Image (cartoon, rainbow, N blue to C red):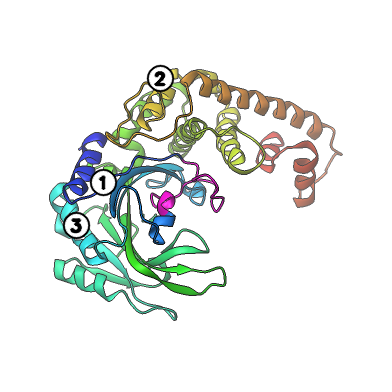
Amino acid sequence: MNTHETISTFLDFYREHGHEISPSQSLLPPHGDDSVLFTTSGMHHLTPHLLGRPHPLGRRLSSVQRCLRTTDLDEVGDPTHLTVFEMLGSWSLGDYGGGQSLRWGHRLLREGFGLPPESLYVTVFGGDDQTGPDVESLHTWQDLGVPVELLGKDNWWSNGPTGPCGPDSEIFVWTGSGVPRDTPSTNPDWVEVWNHVMMRFERLPDGSLVPLPRLSVDTGMGLERLLTVLQGKDSVYETDVFEPWQQTVPTLWPLDTREHRVVVDHLRSGIVVIGDGVQPSNTGRGYVLRRLLRRVLTILWSGNHPLLDELPLDLYIHTLDHFGQSQTGTGTGIGTRTDTSTSVTPENIRHVILDEQRRFLQMLDRGHKVLSRRPRGQVLDGPTLRFLHETHGLPPEIVEVLSL
Ligand code: SER
């Protein structure tokens, strides 16, 4: 199943079960919400509705939402983590309960996506000192004949220190070789693809939990992880989402697997972030973008490879089109076009990236000069690195490369 078919299968299933398709939103949180820098989960734009405010589209929603997580940056390059990824989501806003959500999820995975029963394992919240176990989810999975592992804090979901939260049930798929064995918490070949959160509580600033007036359910499934399973691939980077990148990047830069994945992930993420209106800077969202681009430039520059002038415009076009950010593109997710009206063109985005490259090269020049003047034998310890960063704008990772 390719990306387009996978998204359609998901959205059609929820449409048939009375859900309205909510358009994909920008990576930037809604105006006035500064609790996170970027949208990290499909539910982010729905926070007020999970707390009880009526939603104009009703009480059953579904969407494909682009998300960005900086918490996973160090894991990018392994088979499952990406900086920008897409989340297939479904929501009951005070409508049906958690058991129904799990039953539909199970049916979609088994009948819609054809996953064999033995390839599934789930985890359920087993309780802690504040709340009891999630008995309804446990019984639902037992009825469905899916093996369950009861866990603690790993099965409690919240989007931040305050706000809607609750126990969750995570669905894992076996990606290892041979007969599935062990459990999700004991074998990494069980990969989490879908999370169903029973939004029962609101956490207040003093840390206390208050029951919500009505239970909501928030689910999110990582599109690229699902595609990895459905397409029988070893990593998200080998799915059809990345095809144009995989065809082009090895011809431009001979990198090892990990570097190759980081370069693809960060460049693609950088294009999407700029497409949503962010410019590189030294603070906030702009700094996240700058770090992504500088990491790519550092990899290319330290390997003596050509830099980003070589990146074909086609990859910018493909990426903007995939995320529904271009004015002419149709986007891959039919019916999920973005609500962003920013006028972004591939040429403008390339201009921003090449401008950032120019600054990076100027910084290297400055770095060479500063480091060549440093006293013989000076050790690059913590205070020296801090001085070079604060006074000369040289980040430690660049100093490290320059002083090799
Ligand atoms: N909010 C949950 C998550 O991000 C489910 O969508 O995992």
User: What residue sits 66% from the left and 36% below the top?
Assistant: 401
Disc 1 element: strand
Q: Nearer the viewer, mark 1 or mark 3?
A: 1
Label 3 CB, ligand 1: below 8 Å? no
User: What residue sits 76% from the left and 47% below the top?
Assistant: 386
Give x and y (percent) for residue 396: 69, 43
| Location of mark 1 (residue) | 20
Q: Residues within 10 Å of mark 1 (few under 14, many from 20)?
A: some
Say which amino acid is labelled 3: Trp
Q: Which residues are magenta?
A: 27-46
- Tell me if 351 is positioned left or right of 215 in this view: right
Q: Residues within 10 Å of mark 3 (few under 14, many from 20)?
A: some
Label 2 CB, ligand 1: below 8 Å? no
| Residue 186 visible in image | no
| Location of mark 3 (residue) | 104
| Location of mark 2 (residue) | 314
Mark 1 and mark 3: span between their CA atoms? Answer: 16 Å
Say which amino acid is labelled 2: Asp
User: What residue sits 77% from the left and 43% below the top?
Assistant: 390
Verify whether residue 74 appears in magenta: no
Mark 2 and mark 1: span between their CA atoms? Answer: 33 Å
Verify whether residue 35 appears in magenta: yes
Give x and y (percent) for residue 272: 46, 33
User: What residue sits 24% from the left and 34% below the top?
Assistant: 4
Q: Nearer the viewer, residue 229 or 132?
A: 132
* 357, above or below 13, in the image: above
Give the mark, 1 or 3, whose residue is nearer the N terminus: 1
Say which amino acid is labelled 1: Glu
Give x and y (percent) for residue 188: 35, 58
Mark linked to residue 151: none
